[in-house]
Image (spheres, grey):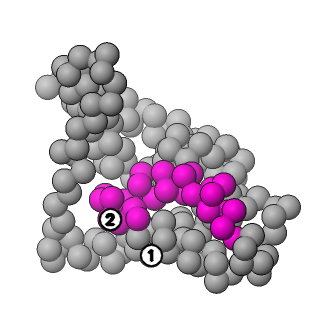
Amino acid sequence: MEIHEFSSLIDEYGNCIYRFCKGMTYTTEDAEDLYQQTFLVAFEKRHKLDRGGNVKAYLMQIASNLWKSHKTTYARHERIAPTVSFDNMEVDIADDNMDISENVVNEDEKQMLRTSIDKLPDKLKQVVVMFYGSELSIEEISKVLHIPKGTVKSRLHNAKEQLKDLLEGEVSI
């Protein structure tokens, strides 16, 4: 793949890859770093990219592998000096027709869901973020993670059950 062709990959798959990175990391900065590293690795391996193949799955696989290796480093850094994220303090009041109280409730619900997803085991969290956040199909997730489609379905089911339990626990408090 030529260099000029590579920029079209970023245009085509950039949003999907960024959503995955954002879903898997804890801060915007980490998501941006993972996103950039993914495309740097893809650029270095552009000679292996085949436009006829599943490029999206290949990029997701790169991001997933980088995230796994980053996770170990991140955990060590968190033990030494925990990070504080101000992402939760952002308020988006884009819809003038929406009442401010509705916006606050929506943000609270989103934050509760994000917190619950973060509590999932990594195997389940990864599948949830790929399926719902990056909108990959079960088959694509299967290829990215090198696991059978049945395992992907099972992990999605287990994640939904655990999220349901976590969210019901949050609401009943």
The magenta-colored residue range is: 6-32
160 to 79, vertically: above or below: above
Residue flagged by tag 2: what amino acid is it? Answer: Glu
Which residue is denoted by mark 1 in the rendering?
Answer: 69
**Rendered location of residue 90, percent (x, y):** 22, 44
- Of the pair 74 and 99, the residue shown nearer to us: 99
Q: Residue at x 36, y 44 (%)?
A: 117
Tag 2's secondary structure? helix
Mark 2 or 1: in front is 2
Q: Position of residue 78 (x, y in %)?
A: 21, 70
Between 22 and 130, the residue placed more toward the observer is 22
Across and down, in percent, residue 147 comes to 66, 57
Residue 120 on the magenta segment: no
Predominant SS of the magenta segment: helix
Q: Is residue 18 left or right of residue 119?
A: right
Answer yes or no: is residue 93 visible: yes
Q: In the rendered image, which quarter is residue 98 located in?
A: top left
Q: Amino acid at mark 1?
A: Ser
* Magenta highlight on residue 21: yes
In the rendered image of this protein, does residue 51 appear above or below residue 20? below
The residues bearing labels 2 and 1 have C-alpha atoms spaced at a distance of 17 Å
Q: Which mark is residue 3?
A: none
Provide residue 169's location: percent of width, then percent of height.
Answer: 23, 29
Residue picked out by circle 2:
29
